[in-house]
């Protein structure tokens, strides 16, 4: 029992650290906010944080395989532009439009995976190239900001549940419960971790590497498009913003690092990435309540990233081999 608990704590130490950091920063934010923690304050914070958290969950999947997806921000923006064009009308049309947005993101992820697996290309180069393609499609769909979205759906997703709980948090919980946990416990999820630890050993163990990577990148694209759909529901419009795409891509990678997922692959959790994304969001809010210049945010984020990466490196240096990581 003691050994199992020790293993569990070691496996999820990054998640606990990110959760503690978020609790501390959010506690300071609430204490310094002029009106404290009200349902409206919580809803506003959640509507912003869940967008990055969803992209961070998407980024976690390829990172577990020792890969990376630099196109997720572009898929996010593409989904935003597409949703602002088709997610309105009758209830059936709204449902079909939302489904098409998710399918488009999954298709983009599948293209990434096919190029990586079948073309034997490096993920970082492949997804950097496809990000340009996806951004071009977004710009073609929405050359100027605009569009609309079903107001009933937008109000339901961006509003509050009974008790003042932000509905966006329920959406994020659904992503964790219905996507991450089944993935983590599935053969594909375990295969992704094995590939990230050692692709050669995973191949020798009979793990279907090509299938695992195809499913992993496809699911990442679908989650990024879900975040783009949520952005449309928050803003009620679409915009092909290259800055927005780049920001969400880089911040999702940073959130993954803060959440304790190793960029070398083979270890990590999407829940830690969620807390990492929440830390990012809360730091921006802290600058607001303390009336600090927005240019200070990169400094704070850089310090936190340096601390997280250094802590992970320190743990690795103390181990004789990767097998000792969870011992």
Image: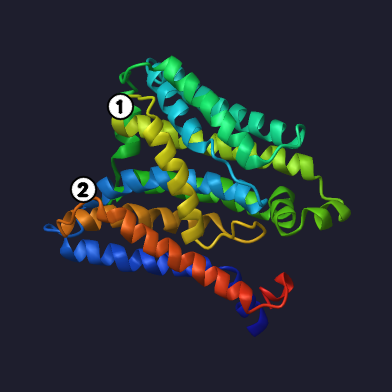
Please indicate whether residue 21 sits to the left or right of residue 98 in the image: left
Q: Earlier in the sequence, mark 1 or mark 2?
A: 2
Crowd around label 1: few <14 · some 14–19 · many ≥20 (10 Å): some
Judge left or right: residue 232 versus residue 101. Answer: left
Q: Looking at the rendering, which quadrant does residue 275 occupy? A: bottom left
Out of 141 and 158, give the one closest to the viewer.
Answer: 141
Above/below status of 201 relative to 50: below
Identify the residue shown where x is 50% and y is 45%.
175
Residue 80, image x and y in percent? 41, 27
x and y percentages locating residue 212 in the rendered image: 73, 44
Residue at figure coordinates x 43%, y 35% from the top left: 245
Mark whose residue sits in front, 1 or 2: 1
Quadrant, the C terminus = bottom right
Give the image location of residue 94, x and y in percent: 43, 21
- Relative vertical location of residue 232 with respect to residue 63 in this rendering, above or below: above
Binning the other alpha carbons within 10 Å of mark 2 as few (below 14), some (14 to 19) or many (20 upward) gives some
Residue 159 image point, x, y percent: 28, 40
Q: Which residue is mark 2?
A: 40
Q: Are marks 1 and 2 in contact (CB under 8 Å)?
A: no
Secondary structure at numbered mark 1: loop
Identify the residue at image location x=38%, y=21%. Answer: 84
On the picture, is 217 further left or further right than 91? right
Secondary element under disc 2, as helix, strand or loop, is helix
Q: Is residue 99 visible?
A: no
The residue that disc 1 covers is 236
Q: Which residue is at 70% across, 76% downward?
A: 324
């Amino acid at each position: 029992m003691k050994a199992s608990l020790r293993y569990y704590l070691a496996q999820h130490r990054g998640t606990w650290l990110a959760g503690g950091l978020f609790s501390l920063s959010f506690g300071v934010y609430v204490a310094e906010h002029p009106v404290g923690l009200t349902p409206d304050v919580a809803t506003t914070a959640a509507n912003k944080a869940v967008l990055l958290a969803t992209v961070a969950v998407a980024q976690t999947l390829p990172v577990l395989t020792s890969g990376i997806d630099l196109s997720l921000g572009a898929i996010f923006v593409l989904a935003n532009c597409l949703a602002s064009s088709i997610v309105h009308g009758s209830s059936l049309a709204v449902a079909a439009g939302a489904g098409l947005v998710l399918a488009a993101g999954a298709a983009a992820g599948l293209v990434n995976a096919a190029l990586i697996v079948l073309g034997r290309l490096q993920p970082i180069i492949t997804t950097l190239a496809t990000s340009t393609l996806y951004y071009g499609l977004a710009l073609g769909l929405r050359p100027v900001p605009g569009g609309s979205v079903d107001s009933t759906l937008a109000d339901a997703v961006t509003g509050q549940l009974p008790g003042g709980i932000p509905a966006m948090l329920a959406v994020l919980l659904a992503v964790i419960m219905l996507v991450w946990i089944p993935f983590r416990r599935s053969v594909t999820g375990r295969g992704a971790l094995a590939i990230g630890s050692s692709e050669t050993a995973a191949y020798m163990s009979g793990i279907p590497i090509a299938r695992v990577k195809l499913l992993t990148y496809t699911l990442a694209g679908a989650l990024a498009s879900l975040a783009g759909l949520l952005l449309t529901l928050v803003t009620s419009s679409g915009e092909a913003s290259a800055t927005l795409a780049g920001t969400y891509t880089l911040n999702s990678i940073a959130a993954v690092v803060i959440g304790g997922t190793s960029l070398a692959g083979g270890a990590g959790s999407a829940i830690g990435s969620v807390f990492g994304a929440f830390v990012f969001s809360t730091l921006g809010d802290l600058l607001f309540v303390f009336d600090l210049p927005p240019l200070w945010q990169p400094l704070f984020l850089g310090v936190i990233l340096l601390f997280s990466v250094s802590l992970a490196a320190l743990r690795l240096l103390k181990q004789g081999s990767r097998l000792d990581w969870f011992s």
